[in-house]
Image: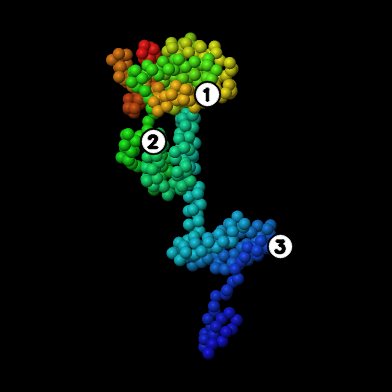
Amino acid sequence: MKTQINNGTIYGTKRFYMARIVKQLTDTEIKKSIAKDKIYKLSDGNGLYLVVKTNGTKFFRYDFIFGGKRRSMSFGVYPGTTLKEARDKRDEARKQIEKNINPIQTKKIAKDNQKNTFKIIANEWFSNLEKSIAKQTATNYKKTFEKNVYPKIGNSSIHELTRKDIINILKTSTNTKRIYNLLTRIFSYSTIHYDLKYNICDFKINDVITSSETKNHTAIIEEKNIKDMILDIKNLNYEDEYYHYSPVMALKILPYIFMRISSLLLSKWEHIDLEEGIWFFPAANMKTRKDFIYPIPLQVKQLLIKLKSICVVNSEFVFHSAQNKPEKHLSRASVSSYLVNVLKYKGQMTLHGFRATFSTISYEKQEEHGYSEFIIEACLAHSDSNKVRSAYNRDSKMKYINQKRDLIQWYADFLDSL
């Protein structure tokens, strides 16, 4: 014999209470709920309820027991978080509790992962890098990542990335060595500052990508092909109505002055002393972040004098914008367009390739010009790779200046003799 009493059932002398059934909320009820003098709750059951504040704000909370203690967590503000979404979050939290996982801790980790996306950390690292290298170089690095890296892993938590993710990027990108080197440094940074367990770029690039797959700067190094290219560049006429003198003259000068294109385009007239034959590159414009003196060969001196005489824009920049904006320097894209599209050297030569051309010819003809590798590398603004030797042989703006002048003039004459 059993008798129903209120919400409990009596068997003999013992009373057993059944769980109270709570009527679930509806969207209509939530929409109709209004602010009152005091905060109040509307229960949806199983620990989920809507809180209505005195200012009319409505948000979902979930109460539960974990580790013997009563706990509570927020699921979001309504209507940004819908009733269905709040229920899904509650159901997921209940599953975690059944597995002895604290859903509050899981939520905190998820929030941390949103803050610790690869793109956020990489940009933080780039900001620090800008303090030690030329701004344009850092900008070029970021552009490489925006094209090749961020679309693939930018929004991923850095703690969730794997070696396979990195290898896929390297196998499908240009500038693979640059990307690999930068990724290695970013992940190393993350092990220190973001508790990454290990650097997932701890492999050697040659172990996963063959030399034929590695895409480097394209350069012309055969003498006959160099001759043809130099003639094509010399025959490029800035007086043609379709061409602009600024990028044309930059391209005419570039074969003789093997500075990085970013450094060259940032140059100002105040950096050039034609009488002394000196072109000064301040540390801020250099990848090495060191001041650099470049001896000007006679061919470049003549081109600079010509450039100054034909300028129609009063600009501080040696190579001003092709849109005749005096406050802006010429873009590398403008110069590259003349080399690639006008002269048709796409896939054969890049702006950076002129450095490789000089390096190759200078090393091949060392017996002819008589200068060592230290002078060749000094002309390229490369530091001595021997750390011990470089420590005792400190860099100076005027270091090897006479030897560099001789070698640079030899190379300029070599180009003209082809």
Q: Residue 235, located in which quarter of the rendered image?
A: top left
- Spot occupied by residue 89 in the image (x, y as percentages of width and height): 53, 60
Q: Earlier in the sequence, mark 2 or mark 1?
A: 2
Q: Residue furthest top?
A: 275
Gap between marks 2 and 3, in whole Å? 64 Å
Amino acid type indicated by mark 2: Thr
Q: Residue 204, located in which quarter of the rendered image?
A: top left
Per the image, the residue denoted by label 3 is 37
- Spot occupied by residue 340 in the image (x, y as percentages of width and height): 45, 25
Per the image, the residue denoted by label 1 is 330
Mark 1, other Cα within 10 Å: few <14 / some 14–19 / many ≥20: many
Residue 176's tag is 2
Amino acid type indicated by mark 3: Asp
Gap between marks 1 and 3, in whole Å? 65 Å
Q: Number of labelled discs? A: 3
- Residue 140, above or below 230: below
